[in-house]
Image (spheres, rainbow, N blue to C red):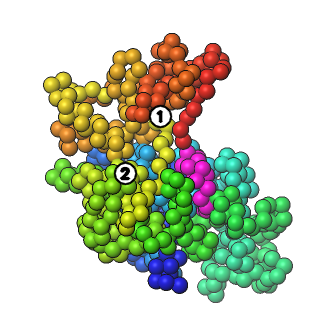
């Protein structure tokens, strides 16, 4: 294998998706612990403060003095180089969160075992499913009384429409948690080590543990054996291909806070999660990681919120070839030539200037306004453009106007650039021509307002319109008379018409009235 092939085969690039408070930060920290990046685990959650909701990782950074603000964490574990991409679930939730899922090769879903599948998880999972990438589930907080594991599995399958395969099974939970029955590694992992200090007990061929173990005598153990018997005989077959296609999710149980079951999860995860794969161009041609040409795409642009430093970072996921610092590349969109000299990479313990990076890695390119979300960069002569990143249906809308009517020029310039960059979506009211902004998360408006003021010197007024259901309509079927106060007619920035429905009732009413009209949502 060439050096590049070896390096690529070591990469595991993934995101953790979860509902707020399910334990994403805690499990991330445990992983960093295994990677030797932090020395002790502890609760890193503080109260959120400041104008901008901070990413959980920023809190880790403050507590630990390590550099994670970057939204990408890189560390080494057991010969693998791991890149974890942040997908904030709370008030930080935005289109960025969705787009980040376009830059990973697999996803880890952390679920609170007392709560089951919650809305935010479901929303993020939709994207994972649509991409068909592998997803591994970790039912967390086993040290607390949780729901029946069989019920959790059923809910996962029903709510998300995915098959599951339990890799291990809890032996009790909460106060009576005794351990994990690890079907995959054929051992029992004890929550509290036995008198001899062992925490692993090998399973015999009959699936039982050797004589002399206290667990054998108790009811919880017998219940566990029954359940394991049930899920292994009546459940899905282990099928690596189905895992890789995202149709079968391997399921693990554990407790991130007490670091129970996290290591076995991480090891098994690394074994089955795929190394970086090919990505398709607009023409549908797959570009393999080992291709000669260096290529990558921009999935996120982060403006520095410090007004003294106007720079932004464009996050580029490398798709093929090798990145070396100072290399010349071309921007697919307008064939502009660029030199990549000011580039940063995200080792969890330092943010260093990167010399080399390979497919699967994320590099941060300092940008002064060149990049847009979805841009392709490539080296060499052959022009390359990757498929567009999908646009997402916004759910929250605000009317926007310039505070000072004399400053229309900077207002328009700011809006145009920030919309192009992918910060927020812009719509124009069909009849009045009013500007309406759409976002999937409230934080996008905050960021937009801040940047308009700081970068374009344009104070704006945002007038909330609340939640709306955006549905695109075939222009040939459009009649302006269809619009009403309950379904506002607007056009997107590509001039395509859509309705903003007040609520589901308004949408249903419309469908009843115009049954022949097709309404379409984006992702
Ligand atoms: P996030 O919002 O998904 O990042 O969740 P956090 O990792 O911040 O966890 C939310 C809360 O749940 C914190 O108070 C954690 O200490 C707690 N927590 C996380 N994992 C566990 C666990 O395994 N057991 C228990 N009992 N609490 C946990």
Question: Hey, which quadrant is residue 136 in on the image?
Answer: bottom right
User: What is the C-alpha distance between the residues marked 1 and 2?
Assistant: 29 Å
- Which residue sits furthest front? 381
For residue 376, above or below residue 479: below
- Which residue sits furthest bottom? 196
For residue 302, above or below residue 222: above
For residue 513, above or below residue 74: above
| Residue 66 inside the magenta-drawn segment | no
User: Which badge, 1 or 2, is on the more N-terminal residue?
Assistant: 2
Q: Is mark 2 within 8 Å of ligand 1?
A: no
Q: Secondary structure at mark 1?
A: loop
- Say which residue label 1 marks: 395
Q: Which residues are the magenta region? A: 122-138
Q: Is residue 457 visible?
A: yes
Left or right placement of residue 171 versus residue 122 in this view = right
* Residue 146 in picture, x, y percent from top left: 64, 55
Disc number at residue 333? 2
Q: Secondary structure at mark 2?
A: loop
Q: Is residue 41 visible?
A: no
| Residue 135 inside the magenta-drawn segment | yes
Discs 1/2, front? 2
Q: Residue at x 79, y 61 (%)?
A: 235
Q: Quadrant of the C terminus?
A: top right
* Residue 18 in picture, x, y percent from top left: 53, 53
Question: Hey, which quadrant is residue 201 in on the image?
Answer: bottom right
For label 2, the crowd category at 10 Å Cα-Cα, with few meaning under 14, some 14 to 19 and many 20 or more, is: some
For residue 502, above or below residue 76: above
């Amino acid at each position: 294998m060439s050096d590049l092939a070896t390096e690529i085969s070591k990469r595991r690039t993934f995101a953790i998706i979860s509902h707020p408070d399910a334990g994403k930060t805690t499990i991330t920290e445990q992983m960093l612990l295994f990677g030797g990046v932090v020395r002790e685990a502890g609760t890193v959650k503080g109260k959120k403060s400041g104008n901008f909701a901070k990413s959980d990782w920023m809190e880790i950074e403050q507590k630990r003095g390590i550099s994670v603000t970057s939204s990408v964490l890189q560390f080494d574990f057991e010969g693998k180089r791991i890149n974890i991409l942040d997908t904030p679930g709370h008030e930080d939730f935005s289109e960025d969160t969705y787009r980040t899922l376009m830059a990973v090769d697999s996803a880890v879903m952390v679920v609170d075992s007392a709560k089951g599948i919650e809305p935010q998880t479901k929303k993020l999972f939709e994207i994972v499913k649509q991409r068909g990438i592998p997803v591994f589930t970790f039912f967390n907080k086993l040290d607390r009384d949780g729901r029946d594991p069989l019920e959790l599995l059923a809910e996962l399958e029903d709510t998300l429409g995915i098959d599951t395969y339990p890799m291990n099974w809890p032996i009790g939970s909460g106060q009576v948690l005794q351990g994990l029955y690890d079907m995959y590694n054929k051992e029992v992992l004890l929550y509290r080590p036995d008198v001899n200090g062992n925490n692993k007990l090998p399973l015999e061929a009959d699936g039982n543990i050797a004589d002399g173990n206290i667990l054998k005598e108790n009811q919880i153990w017998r219940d566990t054996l029954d359940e394991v018997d049930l899920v292994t005989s009546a459940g899905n077959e282990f099928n690596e291909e189905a895992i890789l296609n995202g149709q079968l999710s391997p399921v693990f149980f554990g407790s991130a806070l007490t670091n129970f079951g996290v290591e076995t999860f991480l090891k098994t995860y690394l074994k089955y999660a795929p190394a970086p794969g090919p990505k398709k161009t607009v023409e549908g041609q797959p570009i393999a990681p080992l291709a000669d040409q260096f290529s990558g795409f921009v999935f996120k642009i982060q403006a520095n919120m410090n007004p003294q430093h106007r720079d932004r970072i464009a996050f580029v996921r490398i798709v093929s070839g090798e990145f070396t610092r100072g290399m010349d590349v071309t921007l697919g969109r307008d064939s502009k030539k660029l030199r990549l000299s000011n580039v940063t990479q995200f080792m969890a313990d330092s943010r260093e200037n990167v010399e080399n990076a390979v497919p699967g890695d994320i590099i941060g390119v300092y940008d002064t306004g060149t990049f847009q979300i979805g841009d392709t960069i490539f080296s060499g002569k052959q022009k390359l453009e990757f498929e567009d990143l999908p646009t997402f249906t916004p759910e929250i809308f605000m009317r926007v106007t310039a505070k000072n009517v004399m400053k229309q020029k900077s207002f328009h310039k700011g809006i145009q650039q920030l919309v192009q960059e992918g910060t927020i979506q812009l719509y124009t009211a069909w009849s009045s021509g009013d500007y309406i902004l759409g976002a999937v998360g409230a934080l996008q408006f905050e960021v937009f307002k801040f940047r308009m003021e700081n970068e374009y010197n344009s104070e704006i007024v945002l007038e909330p319109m609340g939640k709306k259901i955006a549905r695109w309509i075939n222009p040939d079927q459009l009649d302006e008379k269809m619009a009403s106060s309950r379904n506002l007619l607007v056009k997107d920035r590509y001039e395509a018409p859509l309705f903003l429905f007040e609520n589901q009732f308004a949408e249903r009413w419309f469908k009843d009235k115009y049954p022949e009209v097709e309404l379409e949502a984006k992702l």
